[in-house]
Image (cartoon, rainbow, N blue to C red):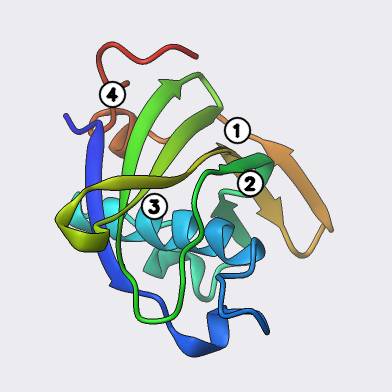
Amino acid sequence: MASRYLHRRRVLFHETDLAGIVHFSNFFKYMEEAEHAFLRSLGLSVHPEENWRSPVRHGWPRVSAKCDFHVPLQFEDEIEIELLVVEVRSKSIRYRGYFWKDPDGKRVRAATGEVVVVSVIADRAAGTIQSAPIPDRFREKLEPHPGLEM
């Protein structure tokens, strides 16, 4: 079972604002990028192949997202997103993301974020979307990280 994943990347120029600082919206994209890489590392996907042509699809919309910023990230910074599973409920998963950088060889937390995803079934033909239990293939591979408060 897995509860933690480290995802490394470099800040790209187009992710920054006029001041050269990462635009706040990109932190949510970074968390999602880390989540997808984490799930791939477990042999899972938020959009598995069986979804591609099926009129009834399983999905993971975000129902809550927040981020607190501590120090700026800038163009060319090498960053590490530490993704932790905080909670696995019957129909939702809560992740926490810590954003780290190493200026001058000292590890610094740049931001802390959280996102809650909900398991849903979307029926395109009927035009409906409903929450659904987390599939067993996910539940069997995810567990809350020990020692995290909710």
Is 31 or 93 nearer to us in this picture?
A: 31
Q: Residue at x 23, y 45 (%)?
A: 5
Q: Could you tell me if the residues under marks 1 and 2 are in contact, i.e. CB atoms within 8 Å? A: yes
Q: In this rendering, which labeled residue sits more in front, label 2 or label 4?
A: 4
Disc nearer the start of the sequence (2/4): 2
**Three-letter residue code for mark 1:** Ala
Helix or strand or loop: what does disc 2 sit on?
strand
Q: Is residue 72 left or right of residue 79?
A: right
Q: CA distance from mark 3 to mark 1?
A: 20 Å
Is residue 141 in view?
yes
Q: Residue at x 43, y 84 (%)?
A: 12
Disc nearer the start of the sequence (1/2): 2
Q: CA distance from mark 3 to mark 2?
A: 20 Å
Q: Residue 132 shows which numbered tag?
A: 1
Q: Residues within 10 Å of mark 1 (few under 14, many from 20)?
A: some
Image location of residue 130, percent across then percent down: 73, 39
Q: Residue 121 shows which numbered tag?
A: 2
